[in-house]
Amino acid sequence: MIVTFFKIFLMWFVAMPLSIIALLSTPLDRSGRTFHSMSRIWSHFILWLFGINVRSKGAEFIDPAKHYIYISNHASAFDIPAVVVGIPDDIRFVLKKELTRIPIWGWALKYGHYITIDRGKARDARKSLEEAAERMRNGASVILFAEGTRTRDGKLQPFKRGAFALAVKAGIPIIPVTINNTFRILPRGSLRVHPADIDLVFSKPIPTAEIGGREEERRLVELVRDAIVSNYIEQG
């Protein structure tokens, strides 16, 4: 545990200067590439620090000339660096507004190129969704965790509607992403890290431009879930 705590300290120690660079790059690089590069450097460092490798399958479904909404399962805090490293795209995270209150790192999230959602008042939440959808239509690929929070037992949880409502608003194709082997690395509520190889499996893009109404949206949820389930290895 002493070694683990030391590695966590190093992880955050390295995060601070990278966050400052990312924050300073925001007004200078409107494309967000510098911001994402800092995120990738940090993610590579975390995975190297804990002896974790990421393997990707199905990257041929990703057209570098297009942008997508990547929707995945969520089993561990290590899902975040895994998708940053493993997805060959300049992705943005959609995250809750509360995270932006963390000094330096949170400020980089707030003023940078990630998309924040205010989940408090219903009116503010709707406004956040509209702004997020507009940013996606203007060329940002994003990653969303369909379950909303990490699984506690390694099994897939029900998928939340919010990610799919956002995808339909934006009218951007969804690429389902299955993340395997992260649950045992760092289960929710644990600080003990068990190194392992993480597998990301990309499925074929699913169009959303012609979807309208709750029934078609529910069908979209089923299609994405079925794609993730088809590649999922139960991790409990």
Image: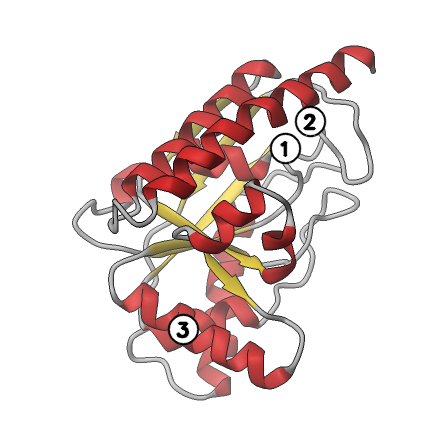
Visible residue check, residue 200: no
Disc 3 on helix, strand or loop?
Answer: helix
Compared with 139, 24 (above or below) is above
Compared with 8, 172 (above or below) is below
Compared with 154, 78 (above or below) is above
Disc 1 on helix, strand or loop?
Answer: loop
* Disc number for residue 182: 1
Does 127 sit left or right of 3 as displayed?
left
Q: Position of residue 166 (x, y in %)?
A: 45, 71
Q: Position of residue 102 (x, y in %)?
A: 64, 47
> Disc 1, disc 2: CB below 8 Å?
yes
Split into 4 quadrants, where in the image is the N terminus?
top right
Q: Which residue is mark 3?
A: 131
Amino acid under label 1?
A: Thr
What residue is rendered at 46% in x and 35% in y?
20
Q: Position of residue 53 (x, y in %)?
A: 51, 19
Q: Which residue is mark 2?
A: 185
Name which of mark 3 and mark 2 comes first in the sequence: 3
